[in-house]
Each structure stands twice: as C-alpha cells, then as structure tokens.
Image (tube, grey):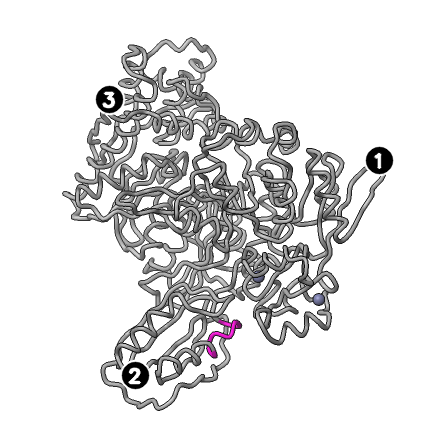
C-alpha cells in the first residue's frame, strides 16, 4: 500500500523530518518526507497494517515544539515508483508569498520546565523566565520569520557556555528562547517609597514582589505578552484594583498554582481540565463551589480560572496562593507592553512593578473560554476572547481555494480582530479591543502592520464591515487608497454566519445571527437576523420587528431606558417626560431589530439588572436567573411570526415583551421561570423559522452565531431542538461568536466570493 500524506501545522524548524524518517524506519516503511511550503508531504509505502498505524500515529506523535493542525491523506492506487528506503528530500526554497506559514503562539510553561523551576538542585531553580524547545514566548517576541534567536527579542542575550551546550543537544536543542540566571533576561522590582524610586533585581526582585503581594499590595507584572496587575484574592486589594482600573463590576480572572487548587474553588470536568492545562493556558469560566470575596467575582456565578503560563506566575502563586491576574491597563484600554509607559501610568498608584529586560513585540491579552455540554456528553469549547496561546494559528479551510489572492479582513469596531486569508487558510489575529478607545485604535493599526510584515503578506483585496462610520471601515478605505487595493463591504450579521461557515467549510446555510448591533443594508441597526446564506450572497429571510429606541449610543448601556421605549411603543404610560418627548419628536432615536436589546429590556423589566456596566452584563444575569429555574413549570411565551408585504418574516418582539410583562405583573410565576420561559420562546422561534425556511429553500444546515450565543441556555437548547428536527447544526468552536469573529467571516467571504479575482 502506498499513501500520500500531508501534515499541516507548525512543523518547520522543530526537527520534524528527521523525526518522521526515524518513525518510518521503526514501522518498516519506505518512501520520503519533504517540506512543501506550510506543510510536510510524506509518501509511505509498505504493508497495509503498518502504513495505517504509521498514519494513525501522526496525529498524536510529534517532536516537542510542533503543532499538528491536520493530517490529510490519499491512497495512491498505481504508484509509478518503487521505494526501497525512506529519505528526507531537500526542499526547494519556499517563498512565503505563496503560502501563509504556520507560526507558533506563545506556549505556557511545560511540565519539564516547571519541575526544574521548583527543583533546588537545578541550575534554573526559580529562574522566572525558564523555557525550552516546547514552551515559552513565541509570537510575543518574534520580529520576522523564519523563527530564530536572531529574529526574536532574545537576540541581545548572548548564550552562556552552559546554555550553548544545551542548545546543541537534549530537550533544549534549538530552543531559541534558551536562557538562565547567568545569561538570560533578568527580573527587576521597582517601587516608590516616600517619593523615591527603589529597585531590586534577580531573586531579590521576586522576593520583594512576593512580600508586597503577601501584605495585600498590588503590583504590575510584565507577563509573556503584556503588563498585568496582580494581587491576592482579598477584598481590599480587589476593591482598590477596581478603582485603579475603572472596572466597576466585571469579574476578575484568578490564577491558581495548579489544578488541585482550582478544584478547591471550582467544578472542573475533564474537558475543562484539559483546557486549563493546554499550552495556551486560557482563562476558563468554571462553576464555583467555594466563594471568593465579593469584590473578586462580583455577581458572577463563575470563576474565570487559569494556570500559570510562565515561571514567574507559578512562583507568585506558590508564595501567596491564588492571585487576581488581570490586564495592566485601564478598563477598555489597550494592553501595555512598554516599561516606561506602564511606569508613567501606574507605578505611583500601585505598590511596585516586577518586570524584565526582554522587550515584547506583540501585545496579547489572556484568552477566555468556557465549555458547554451540547447533549450526549458532547462538550463544546466556546471562545469569548481568542488571544495569547491561540494567535496566530490558522483555521484550515477544507474546501481549499486555488486562487492566489490575498485578503486582509479588517473586522469590526467592537472586540476587534482582523484576519489574513489565502488559499486554504485564514489567520485570525488576537483579540485587540474596542476601537473607540484611541489607544486601542492605534494599537490595532500597528498590529495589522506587524502581521503584514511578519507573514510577508501583501493583500490585494481588503474586506470590511458595511458600517460607514466604523473606525475599521474608515481604516480599510485609507489602506485601500494608499495601497491601491480593491475593497469589499460585508454586512455584519452575514459575516457572523460566514465565521461559522468558515470553521466548517460550508458554502450555504440558514444563518441565525443574534447580537447587539450591526449596520444593516437598509441603514437600520440590525441584531435579530435570520439569513439564508448562499456562497457570497445572503437574503434576509426574517428579523425581529423594529423598535424605536431613544438615547443613541447610550442605549446599549441603559437597559431601563430600552425598557421604557418598548413600553412606550406598546402605549403604556412610562412616566418619563424626556423619553416620551424624544420618542414622539424623534430626537436622537433609531430603529433596531436587536436581540441584545431585547435581553436587556427583559432584564430591566424583571428587575434583575437595569444597567450594563460591561457589555452583556444584563443578559448574563438574566441567563443566570433562568438557569436557576426548575425548568418544568414555566410560562409558555410565543414569538409571533408575521409575514411582511415583501415576503420577509417578522418576529413580533413587542408582542412577546407584552406577554412577559403581563405575566410579570400578575406575579403568577417565579422570576426565574419567567426568565427561562423567555429563553425558551426564542428557542421555539428559532426552530419554527428554520422549518419555514427549509420548506422554502431545502436548506437544512443551520449556523448559530453572534454574541447572544455566548448564552449557554440558548446555544444548548437551540442545538438540541434543531437536531431533534433533523437539521445539521453548526456554531463557532474556534473563533468567538461575538464581534471578534467578524473578521474571520469577512476573510472567508474573500475566499469563497467568485467575483474577487486579482485585478
Ligand atoms: Zn519547557
Ligand atoms: Zn545561560
């Protein structure tokens, strides 16, 4: 039997080909291995059983430092050559302009390095920046490809003789970040006392930081990919940190020394444990079983838990217990990577900063995710923020595109990301933030530039949102003028659906796209959209009825105001002259079909929460309330589906709101049951409308996307009911369903759109 295998992933520069050659010999297989751009091609010839087990081993067995994304193979029925040995074939030089290379994300500290870090006899005992060939910073310190010590911020640190010896052989062979107490970056602790600046270095710096933390202080810490604030999980420092950051209610993430300590506070299932331990070391939202002080998690029923991503994090956790570890910037501002900027902004407000003399090139936030049970013990990982540990890994598109075009998808303005796309892959950037913050916008433009340079990527087409006033759209236009590039505009909710289609290489679907806000083709604010997506086209089959809201940009924050507008539209007496006047005179008003606002409005109606101090706060508390229902005796609300004169279906959200209000006023049900009934009304509506569209179009694939699908009940129940009705259901598993996923959808649009050939 002869098969041709393609292994895609980060397989270059990690000794992958010699590894494969050894393995082939072990299995008694002949053939060859060679680099083909961003993948490795293997021809394996031999006895069928041997060839199959060799193939099977490729998924799980690879040299440390490699990341395997996909293994494709095909049988060669009539091989033209006989292979009598196994060879490594030298690759022709590969031009990056043909392929998007796979480059490594930052990798959390590995078990070997952890062991050495804590081993008194090891020469790297307590070396905070310990790393090896399989762990340590990658994207955060790279300046250009290929990955080599000289192309990273390690270049200024000359290896000592001991490190150099390890660089040549053993588990640190070719580890570009190799370093130690003697030759690597060193920690410094700086703090103000009586107006004077003091500093300590090396082990003393770490000890000093531990002392400050133990006494309830707050420090700034230069992490792998940006500054963080760190303090103990106690009420006092947490409260003080909220005021320093300007962060009212949003829960803080908590870092634990190891999994055992996480389990003291949280329920952890197998999948969650796997995620916590994974090299990306994301923050995982876990159900709490033991309370933290209120100031740490506020009203959340979850703890955002994570494990140390570097040696220094582990040393701090070991010494002071669980720590609050959050980005070292103002709320809604960008990640800080520059020592001087952090010092200027914060050192006088906190109790010291622990940093080192290796520069960070690429700022990245911590990634955030959670796991839901989608039925039959099938677990699904949902990303809320995809950043450190995941970027810049690509999404592989199965229906590979043969065009040579390169697309730069610019994303949207909220929770911004961008994406590069070419042939069979899309590289989504890390989460960057909201562009209405000037610093974030500057950072966003800079990171786009860094990616273009790093991947030697020369886009010939730019794709952006339809919103004419988005900063991202304006920047897309600037870039297109400056570089003389074609530009395409993709409607926001279509882009959400496309992001799911991209992950699953689909070419058509019914797109259920629920979120807070996005610019529609009719110039109104969309957000409760059911689309029929077909290739690079879509038609809006159904949407929530339009409701007139006042308050302009403040509406998304002010749930009580939104509720009054709904009541006014239903002719209730709202006892608010200002809102009445604004609505009747149409001052600062807009029409919207937003699902996000409907959640806010119901939250305010049920008196659960009336104001969003962070995005989604009202909706999250409404969901928590619904989750606490016994889910048996709940009111059956109904989303009425009407048909417009042009054939578009309209889901009457005012009528639904009115049903809920009546039941609420009657006090005939528990609040939790009303909240659950509201969720289930949406679930039934999704099923109904999908059945209608399937009858009209024969489409049976459904893609669920948009930030509202961070709602566990909604996602879980929609998947269940649609599957029960024989739909094929897809949702975001690799990029967030919120606006961070929009860039990936735009990028996929580029790859599948027939019209976008090179000029
Ligand atoms: Zn390591
Ligand atoms: Zn050294």
> What is the crowding at mark 3: few (fewer than 14 residues within 10 Å), some, or many (at least 20)?
few
Left or right of residue 241, residue 414 in this image: left
Q: Earlier in the sequence, mark 3 or mark 1?
A: 1
> What is the crowding at mark 1: few (fewer than 14 residues within 10 Å), some, or many (at least 20)?
few
Residue at numbered disc 2? 46
The answer for how far apart the CA atoms under marks 3 and 1 are is 64 Å
Residue 694, image quadrant: top left
The answer for how far apart the CA atoms under marks 3 and 2 are is 63 Å
Q: Is residue 371 visible?
A: yes
Tell me the SS state at disc 1. Answer: loop
- Magenta span contains residue 721: no
Residue 632, image quadrant: top left
Residue stretch in magenta: 12-18
Residue at numbered disc 1? 195
- Using the image as rendered, state which of residue 288 and residue 449 is in the foreground: 288
Tell me the number on the disc at residue 633.
3
From the viewer's perspective, is residue 573 above or below residue 12? above
Q: Is residue 759 visible?
A: no
**Image x and y of residue 304, in percent:** 50, 39
Tell me the SS state at disc 2. Answer: loop
């Amino acid at each position: 039997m002869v098969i041709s295998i393609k292994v895609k992933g980060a397989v270059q520069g990690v000794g992958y080909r010699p590894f494969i050659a050894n393995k082939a010999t072990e299995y008694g297989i002949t053939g060859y291995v060679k680099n083909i751009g961003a993948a490795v091609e293997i021809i394996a010839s031999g006895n069928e059983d041997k060839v199959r087990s060799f193939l099977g081993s490729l998924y799980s067995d690879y040299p440390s430092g490699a990341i395997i994304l996909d293994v494709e193979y095909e049988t060669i029925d009539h091989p033209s050559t006989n292979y009598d040995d196994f060879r490594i074939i030298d690759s022709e030089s590969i031009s990056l302009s043909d392929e998007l290379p796979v480059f490594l994300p930052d990798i959390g500290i590995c078990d070997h390095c952890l062991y050495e870090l804590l081993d008194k006899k090891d020469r790297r005992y307590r070396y905070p920046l310990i790393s090896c060939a399989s762990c340590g910073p990658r994207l955060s310190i790279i300046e250009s490809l290929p990955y080599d010590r000289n192309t990273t911020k390690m270049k200024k640190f000359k290896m000592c003789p001991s490190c150099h010896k390890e660089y040549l052989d053993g588990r640190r062979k070719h580890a570009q970040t190799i370093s130690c107490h003697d030759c690597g970056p060193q920690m410094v602790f700086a703090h103000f006392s009586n107006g004077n600046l003091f500093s300590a270095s090396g082990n003393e710096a770490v000890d000093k930081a531990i002392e400050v933390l133990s006494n309830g202080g707050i420090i700034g810490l230069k992490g792998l990919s940006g500054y963080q604030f760190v303090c103990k999980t106690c009420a006092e420092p947490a409260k003080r940190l909220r005021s320093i950051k300007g962060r009212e209610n949003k829960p803080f993430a908590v870092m634990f020394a190891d999994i055992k300590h996480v389990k003291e506070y949280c329920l952890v299932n197998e999948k969650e444990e796997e995620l916590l331990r994974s090299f990306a070391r994301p923050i995982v939202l876990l159900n709490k079983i033991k309370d933290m002080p209120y100031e740490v998690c506020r009203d959340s029923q979850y703890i955002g838990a994570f494990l140390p991503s570097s040696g220094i994090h582990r040393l701090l956790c070991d010494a002071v217990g669980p720590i609050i570890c959050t980005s070292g910037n103002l709320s809604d501002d960008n990640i800080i990577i520059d020592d001087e900027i952090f010092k200027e902004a914060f050192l006088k407000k906190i109790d010291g900063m622990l940093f080192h003399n290796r520069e960070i090139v690429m700022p990245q936030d911590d990634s955030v995710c959670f796991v839901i049970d989608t039925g039959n013990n099938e677990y699904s990982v949902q990303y809320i923020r995809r950043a450190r540990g995941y970027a810049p890994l690509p999404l592989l598109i199965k229906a590979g595109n043969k065009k040579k075009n390169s697309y730069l998808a610019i994303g949207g303005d909220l929770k911004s990301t961008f994406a590069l796309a070419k042939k069979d892959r899309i590289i989504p950037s890390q989460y960057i933030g909201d562009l209405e913050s000037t610093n974030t916008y500057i950072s966003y433009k800079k990171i786009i530039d860094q990616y273009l340079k790093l991947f030697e990527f020369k886009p010939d087409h730019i794709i952006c949102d339809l919103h004419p006033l988005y900063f991202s759209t304006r920047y897309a236009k600037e870039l297109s003028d400056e570089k003389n590039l074609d530009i395409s505009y993709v409607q926001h909710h279509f882009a959400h659906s496309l992001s799911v289609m991209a992950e699953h290489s689909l070419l058509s679907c019914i797109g259920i796209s629920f979120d807070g806000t996005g610019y529609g083709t009719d110039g109104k604010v969309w957000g409760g959209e059911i689309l029929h997506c077909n290739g690079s086209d879509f038609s809006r089959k159904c949407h929530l009825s339009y409701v007139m809201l006042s308050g302009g940009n403040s509406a998304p924050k002010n749930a009580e105001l939104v509720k009054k507008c709904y009541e006014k539209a239903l002719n209730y007496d709202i006892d608010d002259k200002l809102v009445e006047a604004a609505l009747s005179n149409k001052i600062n008003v807009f029409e919207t079909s937003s699902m996000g606002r409907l959640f806010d409005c119901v939250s305010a109606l049920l008196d659960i929460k009336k104001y969003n101090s962070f995005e989604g706060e009202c909706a999250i508390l409404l969901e928590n309330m619904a989750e606490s229902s016994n889910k048996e005796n709940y009111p059956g609300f109904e989303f009425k589906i009407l048909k417009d004169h042009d054939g578009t279906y309209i889901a009457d959200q005012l009528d639904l709101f009115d049903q809920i209000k009546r039941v609420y006023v009657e006090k005939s049900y528990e609040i939790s049951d009303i909240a659950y009934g509201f969720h289930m009304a949406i679930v039934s509506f999704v099923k109904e409308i999908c059945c209608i569209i399937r009858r009209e179009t024969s489409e049976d694939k459904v893609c669920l996307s948009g930030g509202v699908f961070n709602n566990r009940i909604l996602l879980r129940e929609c998947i269940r009911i649609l599957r029960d009705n024989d739909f094929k259901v897809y949702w975001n598993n690799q990029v967030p369903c919120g606006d961070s996923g929009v860039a990936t959808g735009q990028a996929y649009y580029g790859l599948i759109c027939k019209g976008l050939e090179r000029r």
